[in-house]
Amino acid sequence: MIDLENKLSEHIHYDIIPQSESEDGWDVRINEEFPETVIRFGNVKLEGSEGEEDDGYLSFNFNIVSSPDPDLTINDLTLQEYCGRILNSVLEASMSEGTVVAKDDETGEIMTNNDELAEEWNEYKSGTDDTKESVNE
């Protein structure tokens, strides 16, 4: 069952915008909870034991590209949770549009079968991974 109260929508809660320094990259501008804050997702990874639904989760990292709040950091738990909700929304939309591209972390193999990815996606839960790769810019 979809929790509509917590569901975020592009063009309402956030906008996907081109990265200023890359023609191929995209950033996310937050419109509501942290107005005009721009974030960039880094690694997004499905973690856990294969075939074990309860052990799986989605880990990700992100950095703050810009924010009008000079005290906002990636360590802010409310921001982490909100970014997780944004990522969930982006991935759901990408799955429904068939635009997701995933790469196996160990083999480097590109996985392009959207049906297989959708099946795996449904097995995982959202989580945060505040790794050393996350930095404030």
Image (cartoon, helix red, strand yellow):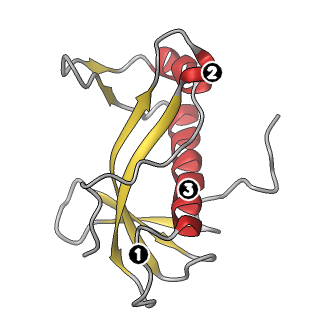
Disc 1 element: loop
Residue 81 image position (x, y, % from top left): 58, 58
- Left or right placement of residue 19 versus residue 8 in this view: left
- Left or right placement of residue 98 versus residue 7 in this view: left
- Mark 1 or mark 3, which is nearer to you? 1
Q: Which mark is residue 86?
A: 3
The numbered mark, 3 or 2, whose residue comes first in the sequence reads 2
- In this rendering, is residue 49 above or below 60? above
Q: Residue at x 60, y 53 (%)?
A: 85
Q: CA distance from mark 3 to mark 2?
A: 22 Å
Identified by mark 3, the residue type is: Ile
Q: Residue at x 81, y 51 (%)?
A: 4
Task: Tell me, yes or no, whether the two marked residues, 1 and 3, touch with CB atoms within 8 Å.
Answer: no
Disc 2 element: helix
Q: Which mark is residue 54?
A: 2
Identified by mark 2, the residue type is: Asp
Q: Pointer 1: what residue?
A: 73
Q: CA distance from mark 1 to mark 3?
A: 17 Å
Q: Residue at x 43, y 68 (%)?
A: 75
Identified by mark 1, the residue type is: Thr
Identity of the residue furthest to the top in this view: 51
Q: CA distance from mark 2 to mark 1?
A: 30 Å
Residue 137 image position (x, y, % from top left): 25, 76
Q: Residue at x 59, y 68 (%)?
A: 78
